[in-house]
Image: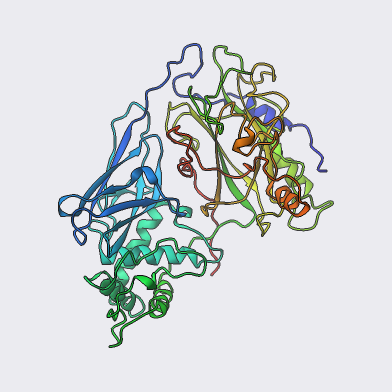
Amino acid sequence: MVKRYAIGMSLMLLAGCGLDPQVWGGLTTSDFTQPPDAGTNTVSGVSTALAANASVKFYGPAGTRLEDQATTTGDGGAFATEFPAAQAYTNLIVSVSSSSVNVLGLVPQVPAKATVYDASISVTLGTDLPDDAGNARAVPFMDDLGARSTAATLLLLAKQRYANPASTLGAISPSALVSALEEIETLIGSDDARVGPFVAMVERLVASGATTKEAFAPFPATGASYLDATALSATVDYDNDGTPDGDSAAFDAALMTAIGALEFNVCYSPDTIRVVFMVDFNDGGVDRNCATINRWKWTEDLPEKQMFIVGSLHESTPNCDSDPAPCLESDVFDAASQLLGNWSPNLIPMFDDGKNGDEVAGDNIWTFALVLPWFDAGAPDNKWVRVSYKYTWGTPGHLWTGTEEWPGNQRILELRDVNGDHMIVRRDFYGDETTNKDASNLRAPNKGGCGTVLWASEIAAAIEGGRKTTCVDDTLENMVDFDKDCVLDGYPSPGTSSPVTIPCPE
């Protein structure tokens, strides 16, 4: 067992030096009016290649389908769909399809409103995107989705998929995505022999009669091609060698050659990872039993309160004093635990100010982002770095009573990157006792509950031993029910946080 030490004097001094957040609106339950719904933002685009009545689907950068954003094209191939304005989206993939063909494109950014009171935002594909420095940049290929937008999208998806380590478009910033598209635009414009053949193949595959159904798979299964060979028509010669093609071999080879021409690379820290905690403190949250959460079951309402997080690394994290590698040294464990307050409550503030990692000011969703030590433990059922934590609604230095979301239990989280964005993002509802609350968990048996929560490694052992395996397994970064309909919609955005990167080796 890893020994835990009391929080250091330096952290205590920081807490007393005026560094507590000046949160937007002075959110307390005594003088706080429930904020209005943030409403929606609109994303619009066009695909003249497919014209009217085509299906439009959006995907997150790791492949999660955004079911609520599906729409169809109208006259001239134009389309528009609404996105929740309290949620930012980055590097979305859009597929426009008819019964016999599909084309792909990218949406680098759908920003959230800065505050819930701001006007709605309209995003048009291909038009100017503010970069990381605030300068406007056009997005190549995306003003009219067709063959070239499809080729560019596949190149970037494949570039990340075949990186070492493998990644997704969620791991890069919108500005970096546009830079990569600009690089592809330059390569095509200069008739680069490594890229040209692949682009020409995509152009032939988008032509009328080349395919019989959607041919381009933006998120193929492991080992599968981005081109579905069963969609090829009997006569299509997509590699232009005079012979009809019945498989994806030539396409796959051309794609690998083309991504080799891209110099765009991102390298990530191998031993640290950014972790983003978010907690929704709005009234009316729905738990995993599909029941309304009572925020005030254990928490007392007093003026001038704000949100805090408290916790430490979990004692079951592999310790180099007793466990084989990969593991953490005790001093690393202790330093990381201090960043979470080392179980001293109401010391580590969270933010609802649109800064400090927070996404939307005043929406009553509080955020705390930090960098923690990390290792890749390999298999999902191995022991990774683990965190225990909970939220408190209190004042600086307040004790536990009346401030914690529940007494005697903790939330648990394993730092395994599920969606490939090189961050760990966990979004919770305050007081929800049906998710990753470790003991006395209230998830109903018909929802998979058995009164406790198991780590993935414990579930694997339970299966091997023939024991009950229906206990809650909610110990990872999570998908979220954004619209409170008791259906998980997708992974939350990381707010204004980004992965920890390092210089790539020469």
Query: Quarter of the image holding residue 261?
Result: bottom left
Q: As rendered, which of 164 and 234 lies closer to the eye?
A: 234
- Describe residue 297's horizontal placement relative to residue 247 as left or right: right
Q: As rendered, which of 220 and 349 lies closer to the eye?
A: 220
Q: Residue furthest front?
A: 446
Query: Quarter of the image holding residue 311?
Result: top right
- Position of residue 13 relative to residue 325, above or below, is above
Q: As rendered, which of 135 and 232 lies closer to the eye?
A: 232
Q: Which residue is drawn at 50% across and 35% down?
A: 356
How many labels sit on residues? 0
Q: Position of residue 344 (x, y in %)?
A: 71, 27
Q: Where is residue 87 in the image (x, y as percent from the top left)?
A: 41, 38
- Position of residue 97 relative to residue 445, above or below, is below
Q: Residue at x 40, y 76 (%)?
A: 248
Q: Which residue is drawn at 37% across and 29% down?
A: 115
Q: Which residue is drawn at 18% across and 59% down?
A: 48
Q: In which quarter of the image is the N terminus?
A: top right
By what rule are the colours in the image chosen? rainbow
- Describe residue 347's horizontal placement relative to residue 229 as left or right: right
- Position of residue 243 relative to residue 121, above or below, is below
Q: Where is residue 451 in the image (x, y as percent from the top left)?
A: 70, 33
Q: Which residue lies furthest to the bottom in this view?
A: 242
Q: Position of residue 150 (x, y in %)?
A: 31, 64
